[in-house]
Amino acid sequence: MAAVGAAGRRGCELCGAAARRCCARCGLAYYCDVDHQKADWVSIHERICQLLIPIHTSLPFFSSEKERKHGMEQLLNRQKHIIDLAYSTAQKFILEGKPRKAIPAGLQALRFSIRVYGSYSVDVVPAYLIMAEACIGAGCLMQATTYLSQAQWIVLKTPDCSLAIQYKLHRDLGLLYAAKGDLEQSVYHLANDIYLASCAFGPNAIQTAGGYFHMANIFLRQKKTDVAKSLYAEVTAIWHAFLVKSVQRQEQVLKLQAEASPFNEDREVSEDHLTEAQQAEAIQALNAILDFREQAPKQQPDETAKVLHALAMLFYLSMDLSKAREVGVKAFDLVKQLPQQEALEAIDRLLKLINSKPFCEK
């Protein structure tokens, strides 16, 4: 990546200022300075650098309408691939606690979404939301407000907008107001988030759990500890139930595979496969709840054990066996001290599953 003097007429990929540098590999990305060039490279450009070339190359002459349609479909699919890649990359950085690194990737998702779907399409809303989330995390609340206002305007202008998009909009509005310190408005939007997610997926769905978790955090800030504790228990119960079913389903699949051909390697299969973003969300929420439980003046060891069990299952399904074993042993030891030990058998079975896998660090 080298400086290119002729790039001055173009706008910087990150800030829009007059650019003085250009990516030497693709010749298509322009920057105002080396810092913005490096930030874009680390966030997303390294992954899409060569993908940009065929998109920006002029289409050849087509001898038939069929060839022209095929060429246009290929171009559209390439652009949609960049949208998906940039969106998932931004989402991953946000969930890893690196919101500033998410911003360049989010900008690419937004640019290509507008290019593919048009400025006022509801299909652009997810990109506005991911940009808002990155800006909230980075403390850029004015920019976040702008992105959420645009997303909200599109949603209001789209009568048939899906509940899946609406609940995410309200969740981000709740997080924005929380960051601004307006906890009353935050609770209002998070309540809408929970209602809409419940309508779309059910009250006990993992998609709904996020709303409960963020609302619990608000109540904790308001010193309403009992309400927060109740909501944290709800989040734990939702993830615990989902993960128990996921582990059981994987056990069944692996058993069938072993019976069919004992010489085949185990393959991780689950109908309810968690996305990388969902895994990160679950780990973030459950670890926060675990900290709350372990630091609470009045201990509830049964609830703490349930959180530990859920985390152990989550780490097992993501093949982080070292952490799964460590947390699973903690859960097992804690349950052994309880008067009611119904969970002991399930945790013991999980530990046997973990120990049956070849040990390796993730």
Image (cartoon, rainbow, N blue to C red):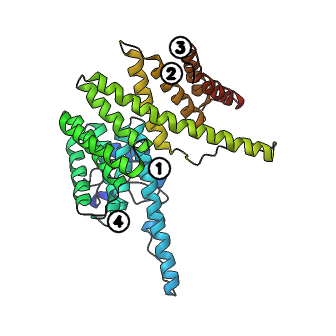
Disc with the residue nearer the chain's start (4 vs 1): 1
Q: What element carries label 2?
A: helix
Tell me which label, 3 or 4, sits earlier in the chain. 4
Q: Which residue lies furthest to the bottom in this view?
A: 64
- Across and down, in percent, residue 346 comes to 61, 27
> Where is residue 178, by image quadrant?
top left
From the image, tell me which residue sits under label 2: 305
| Direction from residue 85 to residue 163 in the image, left or right | left
Q: Residue 241 carries which label?
A: none
Residue with the mark numbered 4: 115
Mark 4 or 2: the one toward you: 2
- Frontmost residue, 302 versus 89: 302
Which of the two discs, 1 and 3, labels the residue nearer the N terminus? 1
Specify the label residue 46 is tagged with. 1
Q: Against 354, is 89 above or below?
A: below
- At x 71% / y 30%, what residue is drawn? 356
Label 2 vs label 1, nearer the camera: 2
Mark in the foreground, 3 or 2: 3
Between discs 3 and 2, the one toward the N terminus = 2
Residue type beneath disc 3: Pro
Residue for point 64% across, 26% down: 351
Instruction: Tell me where residue 296 appears, x and y as whole percent.
Output: 37, 15
Q: Is residue 318 visible?
A: no
Q: How crowded is mark 4: few (under 14 residues within 10 Å), some or many (20 or more)?
A: some
**Distance CA(mark 4)–CA(mark 2):** 49 Å
Count of number-bearing discs: 4
Mark 1 or 3, closer to the camera: 3
The amino acid type, in three-letter code, at marker 2 is: Ala
